[in-house]
Image (cartoon, rainbow, N blue to C red):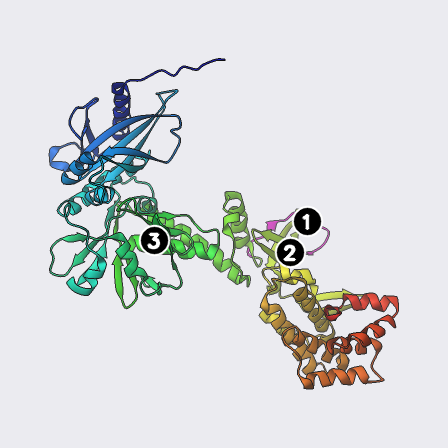
Amino acid sequence: MLLIMRKKYNNKQIEDWATIAVKDCLSMTDTLSQYIKENDKTPSWDGDVLIYKSNSTDKKDIIGKITVQVKGKMADNIKREECTFSVDTADLVNYKNDGGTIYFVVLINKNDPSKKRVFYDTLTPLKIDKYIKDHKNQDSRVINLKRLPGDKYAIQTIFYNFNQDSKKQHSFSNISPIELGTLSSGNGIVEITSSLTIFSPDKKHPSPIQAFLNNDVYWYAKIANSPILHPVELCSIISVVSKDGFSPIFVNGDRYENYVSENITKDDITIRFGESTTMVFTGKSKGARMDYKPSGILRSRIKDINFIISIIETGVIVYGENKKVNLGQMVADTPFDIDSAKKELESYRRIEQFWRSLHVVADFDIGNIDSNSSLEELYLLMKSINGKQPIRVNVDGEHSSYLFHKSISNFKILFILDAVDKEKSIYKIYNFFDYKKIIKITRGDTEHISSQYSVLSPDDYMELSNIDFSKMLQSYKDLISLNNNIFEPANYDLLNLLLAYDKHNDHPDEILKTAKEIACWLLDESADNLYAEIKTINYLQTIKRERELTSEENRKLYEIAENENSSLMFKLGANLLLENYKVARIQFEQLCEQDKEAFRSFPIYKFWK
C-alpha cells in the first residue's frame, strides 16, 4: 500500500504566502497602496491600505486609510466562490471600535502551495455588530467571505465604498440601527438612501451595472432636522417597501405593475424586481446584494434592462402615495457602459417592433437566439422584410414564388418569396399575411381566388406565430367583388379553424372567436351560396364548443334532423349536436364507407360518443 505523505508547513510559511498573495492583488490596482508586513505581530491588524484619488501617490491626494487583516489557510479545494473563517470576538470588537476593517483569508492548495485564492469580507461596524450581536460571551465568531475579484477596478470600488460606509457608520458603532417604523411614525423620515461609487480615475472601468449589482449595499435614513445619515435596519426597509402589498412602483416616470415579489426564508429575504433583478437581504451581514441575470423572454428583458438603467441613472424608486426609496445615485467617471446598455435596449426594442409589424403577439424567447450568428440572421431578416432588400434563400429556384416557413427560436413564421433572380436564388421576402397580390387556391379540379388564410392547414393555425386573426373575416369580404362564391372557401377555412381548436389543449382563444365571427357571417350573408343546413350546423357546432345550446337553437337542429328533405349527412350532424347518440349511430352506419371516412374528418365528429 502506497502512502502519500503531505509536507507539513509552519504558520510563518502559511502567513507569508497569504500576505504575498494579498499584496500581489492590491499591487495591480492604480489607486491603492498597501503597507502590509509578512508575519506582522501587531494585535488584530496586519497593516494598512491607503486610497488615493488617482494613480498619483502624492500625500495630498489621499482619500482615506483602511486597516486590513490577512490570514492563510491550507485547503484541499480552493476552487470556490465563498468560504468561512473563525475570528476571535475580541478582534471583532477591536475592528468595530476602530471603524471596521477588510479581512482577507487566502486558501492555499495543500498539494501545491503555488496555487492560491484570495477571499475577503468588508467588516463595517454594522456588519461586525451583526456578527457579534448576542454572542459577546463567545470566544470567536464565523465570518463569511467571498472571492476577491480579479478586476482592479472592482477591487478599487470595494475599498472606496468600504471607506465611505465605515465613516458613516463609525459614529453609530455603539448605537443600534434605527427601525424604519419609528422613523415613519415619529422623527420624520425624508428619504432612505444608499451610495455606491465606481472608483476608476482612469475612466476605463467595466460595466457600472455589474459593479452596482455585485457590491454590498448599505442603507441610511435622512431625517428631518438631523445633519447626519442614520444607519437603518435592512429588514425594516423591506417592511416599508412591501407594507402595501407591493403596489405599482415608478422609476424615472415608468410604471412597473406587479413587478415586485418577495421570498422569505430563515436565512434571508429576497426581493425580485421583474424577471432579472434580485436584491437579497441576508441575516449574516448588514449588506444587501443585487444580481442581474437577463430574462430569456424579450419583453421581460426590455422591461428589466430599462429598470436597471433607470435605477442607475436616478437611484429612486417611488411607491405607494408618492413615497420614495433612494438607492443612491450611481457615480461613474464615464457613461460608456450605460450607453452600451442603452444601445442593447434599443436593439431589443427594434426586434420587438419587428415582431409587432408581423402581427406576432406571443413573447419571443430571445434566450434561445443569443448567439451572434442567430442574431445576425434575424437582423438580416429585419432589413429585408417586405421587399426592402433581396436576399439569397436556399430553394430549388423552379418557381417565381414560394411559401417559406421559417422557425426562429419559439416562433414559426410564414413568409412568401418573390423571385428576383431564380438562377442565383435571390428573392424578396414578405410577411405572407401582408402580401397584397391575388392568391389562387386549387381544390379538386377548380382554381379560384381566395383569401391567403385558405392556404393554411389546421396545424398552421396552431403553429404559425404571425397569423393576424383579426383580419381573417375581412379578407373574405374584400374578395366578394372578385369571387362571388368566396363563401365556400370561407366555410372550408371555418372547419379548419375548428379542427385546430379541437386538436390542441393550449389553443389560443382567438381561434374560436374568429371561427364564431366567420360562422355568423356565413349564416347572415351567404344567401343561397351555401346550404342552409350547413350554415346552421356549422354555426351551432361552433357555439356548442363554448356553451350549452339554448332551446331555440336545439329547435333549429331538430327541424333539420326531422326534415325528410335533409340529406343523411345533415341529419347525422344535427343529431350529434342534439346528443341523440343512438339515432346518430344508426344514421352513421347507413353511410357508404367513403362518406363515413369523410364524416370522421369533419370537426363535428368531436361530439361523437
Q: Position of residue 523 (x, y in %)?
A: 69, 81
Q: Is residue 208 visible?
A: yes
**Amino acid under label 1?**
Val
Region rendered in magenta: 388-404
Q: Is residue 450 visible?
A: no
At x 72%, y 54%, the residue is 399
Quarter-wise, where is residue 468 in the image?
A: bottom right
Image marks 2 and 1: residues in contact by CB distance under 8 Å: yes
Q: Please identify the residue farthest to the front as the structure is shown.
A: 137
Q: Nearer the viewer, residue 406 or 278?
A: 278
Quarter-wise, where is residue 155 in the image?
A: top left
Pointer 3 residue: 309
Q: CA distance from mark 2 to mark 1?
A: 10 Å
Q: Main secondary structure of the magenta part?
A: loop
Which of pointers 3 and 1 lies earlier in the amino acid sequence?
3
Q: CA distance from mark 3 to mark 1?
A: 44 Å
Q: Nearer the viewer, mark 2 or mark 3?
A: 3
At x 58%, y 61%, the residue is 466
Tell me: 505 left or right of 365: right
Q: Position of residue 274 (x, y in %)?
A: 40, 56
Q: Position of residue 437 (x, y in %)?
A: 65, 65
Q: Nearer the viewer, residue 483 or 577?
A: 577
Q: Position of residue 383 (x, y in %)?
A: 52, 53
Pointer 1 residue: 395
Q: Nearer the viewer, residue 358 or 544?
A: 544
